[in-house]
C-alpha cells in the first residue's frame, strides 16, 4: 500500500513538474517569439535610423554645398563690387584731377585777361578814350562771365559732393544786402536801370554770411542781365507767422515762360528759346542758389510771367539775436576807421610776390605799385635771395604772396616752410597762397600746411587789397 501511495505521489509530482516544464517551455517560447519581434523591430528601427541618417547626411552635404556655393557667389559679388568701387574712386579721382587742372589753366589765363582789362579800363578812363575803354570793358565783362560760369560749375560740383562747409551765424541782412547792392550797382547803372533797396524789416537771419552774399549776388546779377529797361526792386520783409526773413528781388525784365518755370531750378536747363540764345548761360545760377540756400535751411521761390518780369524770393529763418542796428553802425564805423588808418601806412608796406608766370607778375605789380613797395621773384631761388638781402638790410617784407606751382625743385609750400625755418622773423609774417587751384580741398590743404590765407586766381584788385588790409590790421593791431 505504501509503495502504491509513493508511486501515485511520484506520478503526481512528475505530472506537476511536467506541467510546470511545459508551461515554462511555452513561456520561454512566447518570450523567444516576443524577443524575435523586438529584435525585428529593433532591426527595422535601426534600418529606418540608418536611412534617416543617410538622408540627413545627404541633406546636410547638399545644404553645405549650397551654402558654399552661395558664399562663393557672394565672395565673387563682393570682389566685383570692390573692383567697381575702386574703378569709380579712380575715375572720380581722375575726374577731380582733370577738373582741377582745367580750372587751374583757365584761372591762370583769366588772371591775366581780367587783370590787364582792369588796368586798361583805369588808364583809358583817365585818358577819356571812350572807344578803347569800351573795348577793354568788353574784354573784362567776357572774362568775368567766363569766370562766373567756371565758379558756378565748380561750386555746383562741390555742393553735389557735399564739400561745401556751411557756417551758420546771426546775419545782419541790411548790411549784407546794402554791401552786395553797392558792389553790383555800377552794372545796373551802365544799363540805365534803377536799382532800388527797400528795408521793410531789419530782422536778422540765420545763414552763412558768405554764402548768403553769394546767392544774393547771383540773383541780382541775373535780374540785371535779363532786364533791358525799367527797374529792379530789392526788399527785405519779415513774416511773423513763419518766423522768416524774406529778401525779394523783383525786376521788369522779359520774364520766364510758364513751362520753363517748372524746371528752372534744375541744373543745365537753360530756357530753350530766344531768351537763352540772346543771353546765353548753362542755367547754373539759380539751381546752385537753390541747393546752397537749402543747405542753410532756407528756400527759394520764383514767380514770373513772360514779358512782365520776374520775382525771386529768398527765405531764411529769423535769428533770435536782433541787435542789428548797433551791429550795422558799429560795422560802418569800423570800416570807416579801417580805411583812414590804412591810408597812413599804405606807402610803407613792403610786399613780396613769388610768381613764375611773367604775365601774372606784370598784372600784380601794376595793381599794387601805386600803393606799396612791391618786389617780384620768379622762382624759389630768387625769392630766397631777396629774403636774405632784405633781411640783411633790415627791410623785411610784411606780406608774402606765394604761387604754389613754382619751377622745380621748389613749390610754394616747401618755399614758405624753408623761409620760415631759415628766417624766424617770417614765422609772424602772413604768407598768402596765390594759386589757380580752386577746388574745395585746396584751401584747407594750404591753410593746414601753414599758409595764413588763400586767394584763387583770377584775383580782383579790390579783393586783393581787402586781403592785404585784413592782414595788415591783424599784424599792426591798428
Image: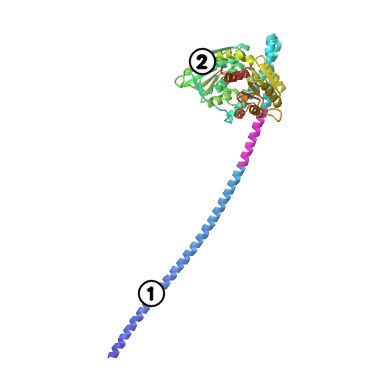
Q: Quadrant of the N terminus?
A: bottom left
- The reply to whether callout 2 and callout 1 are in contact (CB within 8 Å) is no
Residue 476 visible in this rendered orientation of the protein: yes
Please name the residue shown 72% across and 22% down the image: 358
Asked which secondary structure carries label 1, the reply is: helix
Residue 308 sits above or below residue 443 on the image: above
Please name the residue shown 57% across and 48% down the image: 71
Given residues 167 and 22, the one toward you in this image is 167
Q: Residues within 10 Å of mark 2 (few under 14, many from 20)?
A: few
Given residues 297 and 193, the one toward you in this image is 297
Mark sitting on residue 27: 1
List the residue tagged with mark 2: 330
Please provide percent x and percent y for residue 297. 51, 26
Residue 282 visible in this rendered orientation of the protein: no
Given residues 173 and 342, the one toward you in this image is 342
Q: How is the image coloured?
A: rainbow
Please provide percent x and percent y for residue 303. 54, 19
Question: Which tag, 2 or 1, sits closer to the chain's start?
Answer: 1
Q: Which residues are magenta?
A: 82-102
In reply to whether residue 91 is colored magenta, the answer given is: yes
Quadrant of residue 343 within the rendered picture: top right
Identity of the residue furthest to the top in this view: 128
Q: Quadrant of the C terminus?
A: top right
Marks 2, 1: nearer the viewer: 2
Q: CA distance from mark 2 to mark 1?
A: 122 Å
Identity of the residue furthest to the right in this view: 358
Amino acid at each position: 500500500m505504501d509503495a502504491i501511495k509513493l508511486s501515485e505521489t511520484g506520478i503526481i509530482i512528475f505530472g506537476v513538474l511536467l506541467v510546470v516544464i511545459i508551461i515554462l517551455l511555452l513561456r520561454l517560447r512566447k518570450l523567444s517569439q516576443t524577443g524575435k519581434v523586438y529584435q525585428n523591430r529593433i532591426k527595422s528601427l535601426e534600418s529606418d535610423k540608418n536611412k534617416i541618417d543617410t538622408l540627413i547626411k545627404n541633406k546636410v552635404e547638399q545644404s553645405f554645398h549650397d551654402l558654399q556655393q552661395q558664399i562663393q557667389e557672394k565672395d565673387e559679388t563682393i570682389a566685383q563690387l570692390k573692383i567697381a568701387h575702386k574703378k569709380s574712386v579712380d575715375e572720380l579721382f581722375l575726374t577731380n584731377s582733370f577738373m582741377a587742372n582745367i580750372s587751374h589753366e583757365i584761372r591762370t589765363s583769366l588772371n591775366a585777361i581780367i587783370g590787364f582789362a582792369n588796368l586798361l579800363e583805369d588808364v583809358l578812363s583817365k585818358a577819356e578814350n571812350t572807344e578803347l575803354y569800351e573795348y577793354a570793358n568788353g574784354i573784362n565783362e567776357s572774362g568775368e562771365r567766363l569766370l562766373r560760369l567756371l565758379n558756378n560749375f565748380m561750386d555746383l560740383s562741390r555742393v553735389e559732393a557735399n564739400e561745401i562747409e556751411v557756417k551758420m551765424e546771426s546775419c545782419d541782412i541790411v548790411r549784407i544786402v546794402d554791401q552786395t547792392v553797392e558792389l553790383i550797382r555800377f552794372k545796373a547803372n551802365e544799363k540805365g536801370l534803377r536799382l532800388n533797396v527797400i528795408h521793410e524789416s531789419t530782422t536778422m537771419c540765420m545763414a552763412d554770411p558768405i554764402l548768403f552774399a553769394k546767392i544774393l549776388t547771383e540773383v541780382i546779377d541775373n535780374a540785371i542781365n535779363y532786364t533791358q529797361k525799367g527797374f529792379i526792386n530789392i526788399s527785405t520783409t519779415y513774416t511773423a507767422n513763419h518766423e522768416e526773413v524774406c529778401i525779394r528781388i523783383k525786376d521788369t525784365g522779359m520774364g520766364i515762360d510758364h513751362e520753363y518755370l517748372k524746371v528752372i531750378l534744375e541744373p543745365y536747363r537753360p530756357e530753350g528759346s530766344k531768351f537763352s540764345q540772346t543771353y546765353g548761360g548753362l542755367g547754373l545760377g539759380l539751381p546752385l542758389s537753390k541747393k546752397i540756400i537749402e543747405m542753410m535751411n532756407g528756400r527759394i521761390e520764383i514767380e514770373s510771367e513772360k514779358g512782365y518780369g520776374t520775382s525771386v524770393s529768398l527765405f531764411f529763418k529769423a535769428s533770435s539775436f536782433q541787435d542789428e542796428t548797433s551791429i550795422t553802425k558799429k560795422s560802418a564805423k569800423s570800416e570807416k576807421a579801417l580805411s583812414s588808418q590804412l591810408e597812413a601806412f599804405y606807402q610803407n608796406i613792403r610786399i613780396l610776390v613769388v610768381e613764375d608766370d611773367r604775365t601774372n607778375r606784370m598784372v600784380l605789380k601794376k595793381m599794387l605799385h601805386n600803393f606799396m613797395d612791391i618786389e617780384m621773384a620768379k622762382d624759389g631761388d630768387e625769392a630766397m635771395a631777396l629774403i636774405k638781402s632784405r633781411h640783411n638790410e633790415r627791410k623785411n617784407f610784411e606780406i608774402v604772396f606765394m604761387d604754389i606751382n613754382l619751377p622745380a625743385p621748389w613749390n610754394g609750400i616747401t618755399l614758405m616752410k624753408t623761409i620760415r625755418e631759415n628766417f624766424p622773423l617770417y614765422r609772424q609774417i602772413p604768407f598768402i597762397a596765390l594759386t589757380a587751384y580752386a577746388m574745395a580741398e585746396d584751401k584747407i590743404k594750404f591753410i593746414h600746411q601753414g599758409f595764413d590765407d588763400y586767394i584763387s586766381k583770377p584775383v580782383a584788385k579790390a579783393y586783393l587789397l581787402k586781403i592785404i588790409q585784413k592782414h595788415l590790421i591783424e599784424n599792426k593791431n591798428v
